[in-house]
Image (cartoon, grey):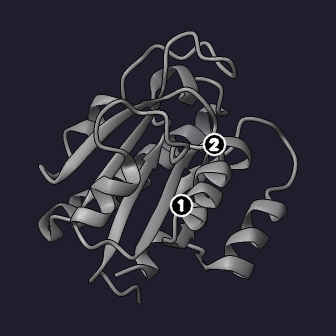
């Protein structure tokens, strides 16, 4: 079971433009898992950062907001950032940075979940670690665009933090 004190939630690229790149069955399973997970965590008022791909960013065409099913379940203790790079913690924001947002809320560990696990999720987890936050991942709350293995992503979470198989194990 995951300790929630000092835990922040990081949602990466749960936008329709990104989800449309995921196989339909995997996408449906991921969105359902997110809804179930967020319904539970809303009561915890967990500090939450939502990263969205900035329109016309270097790595993607971006340009759509986080899907409504996810937005409707996010608590008020949240902030959305438009990221330009894979790593959402890369500090180029003109206002309060993601690091500052978490530090003000006494976050020590970040649960990093979302789309493009082998790009943006892993880069954001690495960025969170570099900013001094512990990292936690959950396989059922991640998906990637390409076919093939995610073992490199999973191994990173295992070696540098914690990895859960299914969101039901978290709480």
Residue ID at (44%, 67%): 110
Q: What crowding class fits label 2: few (fewer than 14 Cα within 10 Å), some (14-19), or many (20 or more)?
A: many
| In the displayed structure image, the side of residue 114 where residue 70 appears, left or right | left
- Dot 1: few (<14), some (14–19), or many (≥20) neighbours within 10 Å? many
Q: Which residue is mark 2?
A: 120
- Point out which mark residue 97 bears: none
Q: Position of residue 4 (x, y in %)?
A: 30, 81
Task: Name the residue carrying label 1.
Answer: 128
Position of the C terminus by quadrant: bottom left
Residue drawn at x 62%, y 32% is: 85
Q: Quadrant of residue 25?
A: top right
* Residue 48 vertical position relative to residue 139 in the rendered view, above or below: above
The reply to whether callout 2 and callout 1 are in contact (CB within 8 Å) is: no
Q: Nearer the viewer, residue 169 or 55?
A: 55
Can residue 74 be seen at all in this image of the molecule?
Answer: no
Residue 157 appears left or right of 148: left
Q: Is residue 6 left or right of residue 27?
A: left
Measured in 3D between alpha carbons, the distance from the residue under mark 2 to the one under mark 1, in whole angstroms, is 12 Å
Query: What element does badge 2 sit on?
Result: helix
Q: Residue at x 30, y 79 (%)?
A: 6
Q: Residue furthest right?
A: 148
78 vs 128: above or below: above
| Residue 80, x across and y down, in percent | 31, 37
Residue 3 vertical placement versus 107 (above, below) = below
Indicate the position of residue 9 as horizontal and vertical percent values.
36, 60
Q: Visible in this render: residue 149?
A: yes
Which is more N-terminal, label 1 or label 2? 2
Which residue does the image show at 64% across and 33% down from the upper left? Answer: 22
């Amino acid at each position: 079971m995951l300790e929630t004190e000092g835990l922040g939630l990081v949602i990466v690229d749960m936008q329709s433009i990104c989800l449309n790149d995921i196989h339909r069955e995997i996408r449906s399973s991921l969105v359902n898992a997110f809804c179930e997970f967020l319904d539970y965590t809303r009561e915890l008022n967990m500090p939450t950062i939502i990263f969205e791909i900035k329109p016309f960013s270097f790595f993607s065409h971006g340009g759509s907001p986080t899907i409504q099913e996810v937005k409707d379940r996010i608590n008020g203790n949240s902030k959305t950032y438009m990221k330009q790079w894979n790593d959402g913690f890369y500090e180029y924001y003109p206002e309060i940075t993601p690091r500052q947002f978490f530090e003000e809320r006494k976050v020590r560990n970040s649960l990093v979940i979302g789309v493009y696990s082998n790009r943006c999720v892993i880069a954001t987890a690495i960025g969170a670690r570099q900013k001094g936050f512990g990292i936690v991942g959950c396989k059922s709350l991640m998906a990637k665009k390409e076919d093939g293995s995610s073992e490199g992503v999973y191994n990173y979470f295992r070696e540098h933090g914690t990895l859960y198989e299914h969101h039901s194990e978290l709480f």
